[in-house]
């Protein structure tokens, strides 16, 4: 067994264990931290596959941005501890998860456990990443990673992923404009109108709850006639 | 001269040769060499931490007309050792309602990820932990992990001031990552590589025989990178995370003893990391005349750190809304405009004959290209500053008018009551 395989097994244990704990732990904040551990293991897989750029991107996007969003939302939640990690939709979720898992196994079968690491690039060989700059002995230059170049060309090429890149850019722009619109500075008059509307809604909700479950049924039946 | 210039590299090579001679070529020897290299990188970083705490206390004291540490040893030079002894002997307290694992893990994560920055920094030709081909991107990615650690510290302590500090962190650190990355991009585009060694060699060989640091070619990017870097490390005047007059000590108020020491160490290493990154990206790193390369990097990094100390000693803390407005309404748009400007200029004025043959454009001397880029970047900076100055003055006048009106109303009310 090579060192790379040992690292692979360790990463798999960490990643799967953390992912399992995410869905079983009763503390929301701990769940977010286990999710980070799981992302970290995935980033380690990218390093094993010699895709350094994707490892760093995984780290930056998932650990540095998305997880922080999760944790922030968790911190603003009132009940963090002692929640039951299950709701009424768990059967549907389990069904979808099983279907996706079977589809994934079917896609990648026959399952191959050999790692796509070339034998000449093992952990033992230290020299593999460097080459000397001509005319400057001792100054080592990193070999340009062709995967980044291929990735960039594929993104810029309209025949490959150019359209997808443009579409995701438009999506991000829409999201940004929406965020600015939600967080815009409101005039006092608007705020007052909004508060009045919310108070009316709350009052209606309270009235509905105090009367009982019969009235909504009548309303629904009434609506269904039209 | 060569012996002095390559001192560090030869030392490392000698140790490696000795270990290979004793253990033979194999995984055991490789792992031993890697462990020694890791310890060496950590020793540089933590030695820098110890020296900088002393230097900062002395220099800030000088700026503020105080004496600073002067009891331990001559001129108080043994103060870092005294501090370390004190930190180790302090009682290690844990809040009763703390989240045990989260609370205890946070300082370790802060220190570890701060140290990881130094693994890709080239200290001299051939003296680099690992020459990653995505070095610059790696540093940004690693830096984002410190946000998580601060959130863990703030939440795990179960203290409302800690939590407030952690909330401020998210707004500040996540926000300032964006201009930091956007201002690193022009350097990466002009170099054509994300490796820090390549970036240094590009600056050293800009005009054939003599080099030109990127701060001359991209003054706007350099300035914006430095400011967002200071904000990213949470140092004064952006020390909102631990504003002691507002939220006690922010996220680390519940930490004592060596756990507090680890958090301080992480913060100093992050600041040192920004100083080193600025020297590598914009000041030419280890490249320089006469002196040996490793001394040049230390000198440049210390010079940048001196600026950080100067700012800390003189500027008051900014408000959270000013901080965020400055980021999202000034730095980010300016950086994007600057990026587009560098892209267009880089396409139009080409100095590389091979690139000229491939893409066309106007072929000019490297020095002329640098001058054009530097002048346009500087002009953009001046225009942006003029616009912002006018805008800020207008806002201030409006605020002052409102305050005046309010005061007059209050006086009228007071007069009518009497």
Image (cartoon, rainbow, N blue to C red):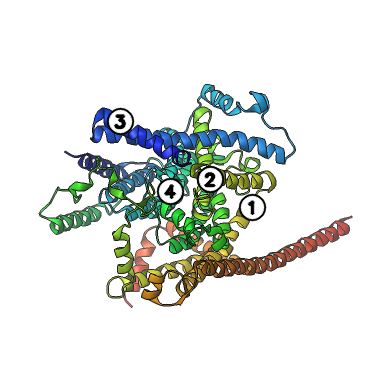
- Report the disc number at residue A71: 4
**Are labels 3 and 4 assigned to the same chain?**
no
Q: CA distance from mark 2 to mark 3?
A: 30 Å
Which chain does tag 4 point to?
A
Q: Chain of mark 1?
A: B
From the image, tell me which residue sits under label 2: B296
Callout 4 and callout 2 share a chain: no
Mark closest to the chain's N terminus, 1 or 3: 3
Mark 1 crowdedness (10 Å alpha carbons): few <14, some 14-19, many ≥20: few
| Foreground label between 4 and 2 | 2
Q: Is residue B333 left or right of residue B28?
A: right
- CB-based contact (under 8 Å), mark 4 and mark 2: no
Marks 3 and 4: which is nearer the front? Answer: 3
- Name the chain under label 2: B
Give A157 or A14, whichever is nearer the viewer.
A157
Crowding at dot 2, Cα within 10 Å, few <14 / some 14-19 / many 20+, comes out as many
Disc 1 target residue = B319
The C terminus of chain A sits in image quarter: bottom left
Q: Residue at x 53, y 36 (%)?
A: B49
């Amino acid at each position: 067994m090579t060192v790379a395989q040992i690292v692979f097994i360790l990463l798999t244990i960490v990643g799967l264990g953390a992912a399992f704990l995410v869905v079983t732990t009763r503390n929301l904040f701990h769940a977010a931290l286990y999710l980070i551990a799981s992302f970290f293991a995935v980033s380690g897989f990218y390093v094993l596959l010699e895709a350094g750029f994707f490892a760093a991107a995984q780290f930056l996007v998932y650990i540095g941005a998305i997880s922080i969003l999760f944790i922030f939302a968790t911190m603003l939640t009132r009940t963090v501890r002692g929640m039951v990690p299950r709701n009424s939709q768990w059967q549907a979720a389990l069904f979808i998860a099983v279907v996706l898992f079977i589809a994934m196994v079917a896609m990648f079968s026959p399952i191959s456990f050999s790692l796509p690491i070339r034998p000449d690039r093992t952990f033992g060989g230290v020299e593999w990443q460097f080459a000397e700059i001509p005319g400057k002995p001792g100054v080592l230059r990193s070999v340009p990673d062709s995967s980044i170049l291929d990735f960039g060309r594929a993104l810029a090429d309209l025949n490959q992923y150019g359209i997808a890149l443009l579409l995701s850019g438009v999506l991000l722009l829409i999201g940004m404009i929406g965020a600015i619109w939600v967080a815009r500075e409101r005039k006092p008059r608007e705020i007052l109108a909004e508060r009045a509307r919310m108070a009316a809604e709350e009052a209606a909700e309270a009235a509905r709850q105090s009367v009982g479950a019969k009235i909504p049924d009548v309303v629904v039946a009434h609506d269904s006639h039209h | 001269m060569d012996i002095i210039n390559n001192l560090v590299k030869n030392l490392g090579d000698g140790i490696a040769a000795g270990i290979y001679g004793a253990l033979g070529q194999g995984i055991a020897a490789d792992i031993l060499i890697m462990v020694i290299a890791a310890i060496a990188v950590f020793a540089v970083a933590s030695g820098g931490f110890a020296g900088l705490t002393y230097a900062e206390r002395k220099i800030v004291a000088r700026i503020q007309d105080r004496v600073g540490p002067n009891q331990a040893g001559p001129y108080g030079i043994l103060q870092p050792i005294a501090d370390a002894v004190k930190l180790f002997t302090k009682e290690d307290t844990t809040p009763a309602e703390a989240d045990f694992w989260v609370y205890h893990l946070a300082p370790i994560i802060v220190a570890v990820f701060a140290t990881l920055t130094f693994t890709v920094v080239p200290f001299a030709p051939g003296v680099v932990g690992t020459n990653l081909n995505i070095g610059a991107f790696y540093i940004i990615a690693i830096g984002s992990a410190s946000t998580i650690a601060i959130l863990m510290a703030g939440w795990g302590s179960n203290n409302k001031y800690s939590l407030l500090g952690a909330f401020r962190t998210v707004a500040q650190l996540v926000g300032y990552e964006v201009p930091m990355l956007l201002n690193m991009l022009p350097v990466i585009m002009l170099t054509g590589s994300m490796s820090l060694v390549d970036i240094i060699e590009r600056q050293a060989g800009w005009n054939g025989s003599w080099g030109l640091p990127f701060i001359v070619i991209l003054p706007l990017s350099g300035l914006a990178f430095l400011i967002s870097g200071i904000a990213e490390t949470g140092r004064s005047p952006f020390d909102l995370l631990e504003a002691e007059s507002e939220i006690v000590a922010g996220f680390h108020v519940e930490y004592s003893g060596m756990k507090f020491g680890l958090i301080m160490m992480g913060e100093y290493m992050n600041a040192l990391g920004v100083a080193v990154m600025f020297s590598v990206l914009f000041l030419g790193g280890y490249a320089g005349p006469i002196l040996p390369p490793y001394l040049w990097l230390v000198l440049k990094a210390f010079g940048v750190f001196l600026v950080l100390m100067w700012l800390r000693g003189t500027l008051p803390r900014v408000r959270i809304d000013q901080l965020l407005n400055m980021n999202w309404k000034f730095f980010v748009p300016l950086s994007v405009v600057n990026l587009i400007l560098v892209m267009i200029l880089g396409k139009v004025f080409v100095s590389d004959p091979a690139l000229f043959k491939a893409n066309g454009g106007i072929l000019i001397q490297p020095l002329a290209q640098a001058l054009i880029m530097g002048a346009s970047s500087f002009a953009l900076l001046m225009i942006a500053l003029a616009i912002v100055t006018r805008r800020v003055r207008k806002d201030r006048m409006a605020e002052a008018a409102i305050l005046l009106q309010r005061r007059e109303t209050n006086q009228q009310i007071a007069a009518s009551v009497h």
